Image (spheres, grey):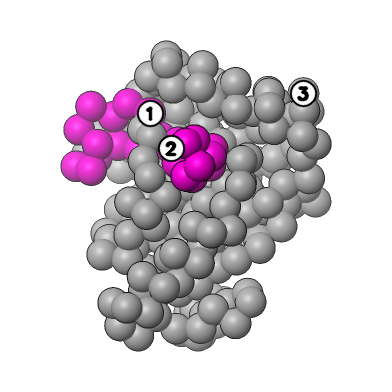
């Protein structure tokens, strides 16, 4: 793992551990599902709920997940208000099926280029412990623009930003990619807020839905 990436994560994780982790230890032991999703107790139940999530997806939705790895837990810990999710992507319906565009590095994506995965792959219960769906207050014309922006970025194939630097445009980390697309599509530089820790501005997954433009419309914690 990139040393700059590790130092940044460790620094924010230490701050997060002191200020925020404690208040989520108890609440995260019990999921707070929307729409009576409930626990995922076996593989058939997992498949049912993932299929349900997929059926809800529309163009421009943002999907969230919490990975099972140590790196995922570190990434979730940078969130100031809600540490349930560690990764995200943007949904586009193509050939009548939802695909997720997302920026990811590590062993799952050795070339670290922007990826396009099926929603079923993105939501896989084998490698994730929770998932969520976010809807934004976007007009139809804005969603069309968003689609064009995502496709253009996918053609450019930017690499995952291991430095977590919001000032670069040729490299993007997962939440930075989502925020950049939404800011360009809406023309509103304040559409998605940022957070600050150890003197550095960044985008947490919670910034994507804990704001006035977003609604977390579905979530579940795997069990």
Within 10 Å of disc 2 (Cα), the crowding (few <14, some 14-19, many 20+) is: many
Is residue 187 visible in the rendered image? The answer is yes
Using a 10 Å C-alpha cutoff, classify the residue at mark 1 as few (fewer than 14 neighbours), some (14 to 19) or many (20 or more). many
Horizontal side, residue 13 vs residue 126: left or right: right
Residues in magenta, as a range: 89-114
**Horizontal arrangement in the rendering, residue 75 relative to residue 110 (left or right):** right
Q: Residues at badges 3 and 1 in contact (C-beta under 8 Å)?
A: no
Q: Which mark is residue 187?
A: 3
Say above or below: 151 vs 70: above
Q: Looking at the image, is mark 3 or mark 2 earlier in the sequence?
A: 2
Q: Earlier in the sequence, mark 3 or mark 1?
A: 1
**Disc 3 and disc 1: Cα gap in Å?**
23 Å
Residue 60 in the magenta stretch? The answer is: no
Residue drawn at point x = 68 percent, y = 51 percent: 135
CA gap, disc 2 and disc 1: 6 Å
Q: Is residue 22 visible?
A: no
How many residues crowd mark 3 within 10 Å: few (<14), some (14–19), many (20+)?
few
Q: Position of residue 69 (x, y in %)?
A: 27, 59
The quadrant in which residue 146 appears is: top right
In magenta segment, residue 112 = yes
Real-space Cα separation, disc 3 to disc 2, in angstroms: 21 Å
For the residues bearing labels 2 and 1, Cβ distance under 8 angstroms = yes
Circle 2 — which element? strand
Q: Is residue 205 left or right of residue 60?
A: left
Expressed as whole percent of the image width and height from the top left, the position of residue 168 reads 49, 18
Towards the viewer: 157 or 203: 157
Q: Is residue 181 above or below residue 206?
A: above
**Of residues 77 and 133, which is closer to you in this image?**
133
Numbered label attached to residue 102: 2
- Per the rendering, the mark at residue 114 is 1
Instruction: Look at the numbered disc 1 and give the secondary structure of its residue.
Output: loop
Name the residue located 77 percent from the left edge and 39 percent from the top edge: 138
């Amino acid at each position: 793992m990139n040393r700059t990436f590790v130092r940044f994560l460790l620094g924010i994780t230490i701050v997060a551990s002191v200020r925020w982790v404690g208040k989520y230890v108890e609440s995260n032991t019990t999921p707070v599902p929307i729409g009576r999703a409930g626990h995922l107790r076996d593989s058939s139940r997992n498949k049912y709920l993932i299929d349900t999530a997929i059926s809800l997806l529309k163009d421009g939705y943002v999907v969230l997940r919490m990975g099972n790895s140590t790196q995922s837990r570190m990434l979730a810990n940078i969130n100031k208000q809600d540490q349930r999710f560690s990764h995200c992507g943007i949904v586009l319906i193509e050939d009548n099926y939802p695909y997720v565009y997302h920026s990811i590095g590590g062993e799952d994506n050795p070339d670290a280029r922007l990826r396009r995965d099926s929603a079923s792959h993105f939501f896989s219960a084998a490698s994730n412990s929770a998932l969520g769906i976010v809807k934004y207050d976007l007009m139809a014309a804005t969603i069309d623009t968003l689609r064009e922006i995502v496709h253009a970025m996918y053609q450019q194939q930017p690499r995952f930003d291991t430095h977590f630097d919001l000032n670069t445009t040729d490299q993007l980390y997962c939440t930075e990619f989502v925020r950049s697309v939404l800011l360009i599509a809406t023309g509103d530089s304040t559409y998605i807020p940022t957070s600050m820790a150890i003197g550095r501005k960044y985008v947490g997954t919670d910034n994507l839905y804990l704001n006035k433009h977003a609604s977390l419309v579905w979530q579940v914690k795997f069990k």
